[in-house]
Amino acid sequence: MSAFLYGVALQWKLDIRSKSLLITCYVVPLLFFAVMGGIFTSINPEAKYTLIQSMTVLGVSTGALMGLPPSLVEIYGSDIKKVYKANGVPLYLGLVSMFLSAFIHLLIMCVIIYTAAPIAFDAAPPASLPLYFSSLAIFIAVSLSMGSVLGLLVKNQAKLTMISQVIFLPSIMLSGIMLPVALLPRFFKIVGEIFPASWGYKLMVDDVFYFGNLWPLGVILLTMAILCVFLLKRLQSE
């Protein structure tokens, strides 16, 4: 257990020095929040009631889909994987330590948005703090699970960047944070519900835990976890 905690702490320190993670987990989400927060609330004053949730969905999706996968490729698509095997280190350790480290970084970024939005843009904070952060934790975990699958599945950085963008853009555009889902054609509504961003946004906006928003995230998380186990076993056999 101590070795595992040491590995997580070490990964945390390495991630702090990572320019890629710094950009995707902090710079891009917070810069977008600083610029678009004012635009959203100026165009539509009612946006202040969901500004924290919408900017949080964008930030988490950016870090999980654009930041985590390249970091995983650095391990599982390089000779570091061989070092793991040679020293008898379980392959899953790299995934778990990066997952937890990214979770903490994204949570910190979300706390910054939660704290700054009411001050900067007069955004309305969620009614229930424990409920909001419980929903947020679930959404971060599900989003990171999808990013983990991408990082284990695609070994080429160029292809990974392209695939991550292909998933990230519709995930954000169809989630409801840019425009109401009710205005979207039925086909795009269905496509949007494939991604965790759509359900995470609904879960955080609601003042109660609604099972109809929770179970799709559970299905996505379970599916991604099964895929991660399968991909790790495939990497172990290579």
Image (cartoon, rainbow, N blue to C red):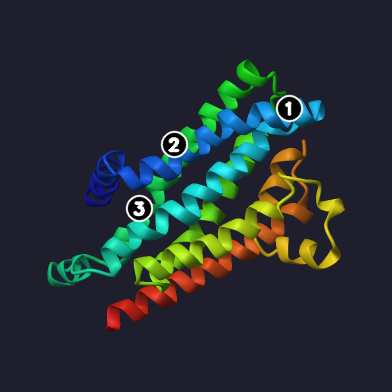
Is residue 131 shown above or below 139?
above
Kindly report the distance in space between the C-alpha atoms of the residues bearing marks 1 and 2.
Answer: 21 Å
Quadrant of the snapshot with the C terminus: bottom left
Residue highlighted by disc 1: 41
The x, y position of residue 224, in whole percent, is: 53, 67
Work out how far the residue at label 3 is from the one at label 1, CA to CA, in angstroms: 35 Å
Furthest toward the left, the residue is 86
Question: What amino acid is found at the position of numbered circle 1 in the picture?
Answer: Thr
Tell me what residue is drawn at x 31 percent, y 43 percent.
19
Q: How many other residues sit within 10 Å of disc 3, few (<14), some (14-19) or many (≥20)?
A: many
Residue 114, percent across and down?
59, 27
Q: Which mark is residue 27?
A: 2
Q: Earlier in the sequence, mark 3 or mark 2?
A: 2
- Residue type beneath disc 3: Met
Give above or below for 102 relative to 158: above
Residue 37 showing in the rendered view: yes
Answer whether labels 3 and 2 touch (C-beta < 8 Å). no
State the residue in front, 79 or 86: 79
> Marks 3 and 2: which is nearer the front?
2
Question: Could you give the CA–CA distance between mark 3 and mark 2, rounded to whole angstroms?
Answer: 19 Å
Mark earlier in primary sequence (1, 2): 2
- Residue 98 numbered tag: 3
Density class for disc 2 (Cα within 10 Å; few <14, some 14-19, many ≥20) is some
From the top left corner, tell me how far across and down residue 77 is, in percent: 28, 70
Q: In the image, is residue 200 above or below residue 166?
A: above
